[in-house]
Image: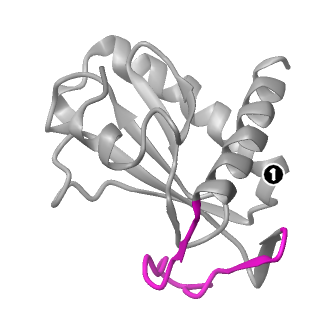
């Protein structure tokens, strides 16, 4: 069963991958193309509360995320933001960074904060069809990155 943070960010519709301890979700509001939320599935609200298994899995999940997004977004940098003010479950906002704009169909995704801090607003709010399309492509990219 999804925790409150997973549910807020659209699980299971936005789910790209899941391990015993972590869920990788597409962020429905995209500050940059391919932005994700990486949510700990353990009932913890402090990073220090994550179990040894959770920390071990985190390294593998981060490798999968970066491999998946490298090919999908062609990011130049990647930012992991732990902003647990509104949603207290342990989670990271994963923001791929790039100079310029990336496109998905007719939708443009500028990195308005480049080269400085990521600008979480303005963000591109995805409609249901676009979420489904991006999630399907990212699930395929996740599987391909895990196969190597």
Side of 46 relative to 117 (left or right): left
At 64% from the left and 33% from the top, the residue drawn is 63
Q: Nearer the viewer, residue 85 or 16?
A: 16
At 16% from the left and 29% from the top, the residue drawn is 44
Q: Quadrant of residue 65?
A: top right
From the image, tell me which residue sits under label 1. 72
Question: Where in the figure is residue 89, as x and y percent of width and height?
Answer: 21, 40
- Residues packed near mark 1 inside 10 Å, few (<14), some (14 to 19) or many (20 plus): some
- Pick the quarter of the image with the C terminus: top right
User: What's the magenta bit mostly, secondary-structure-wise?
Assistant: loop
- Pick the quarter of the image with the N terminus: top left
Residue 138 magenta-drawn? no
Side of 62 relative to 122 (left or right): right
Residue 114 magenta-drawn? yes
The magenta stretch spans which residues? 105-127
Q: Nearer the viewer, residue 2 or 33?
A: 2
Question: Where in the figure is residue 27, as x and y percent of width and height?
Answer: 50, 55
At 52% from the left and 38% from the top, the residue drawn is 13
At 47% from the left and 32% from the top, the residue drawn is 12
Question: Where in the figure is residue 78, as x and y percent of width and height?
Answer: 60, 59
Up-down relation of residue 70 to residue 25 (above or below)? below
Q: Secondary structure at mark 1?
A: helix
Side of 87 relative to 131 (left or right): left
Up-down relation of residue 80 to residue 44 (above or below)? below
Side of 21 relative to 86 (left or right): right
């Amino acid at each position: 069963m999804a925790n409150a943070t997973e549910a807020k960010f659209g699980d299971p519709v936005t789910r790209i991958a899941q391990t015993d301890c972590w869920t990788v979700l597409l962020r429905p509001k995209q500050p940059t193309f391919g932005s994700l939320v990486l949510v700990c599935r353990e009932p913890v609200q402090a990073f220090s509360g994550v179990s040894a298994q959770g920390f071990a899995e985190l390294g593998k999940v981060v490798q999968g995320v970066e491999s998946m997004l490298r090919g999908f977004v062609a990011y130049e940098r990647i930012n992991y933001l732990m902003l647990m003010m509104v949603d207290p479950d342990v989670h990271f906002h994963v923001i791929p960074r790039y100079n310029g704009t990336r496109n998905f169909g007719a939708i443009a995704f500028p990195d308005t904060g480049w080269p400085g801090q990521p600008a979480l607003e303005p963000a591109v709010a995805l409609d249901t069809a676009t979420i489904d399309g991006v999630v399907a492509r990212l699930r395929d990219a996740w599987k391909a990155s895990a196969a190597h």
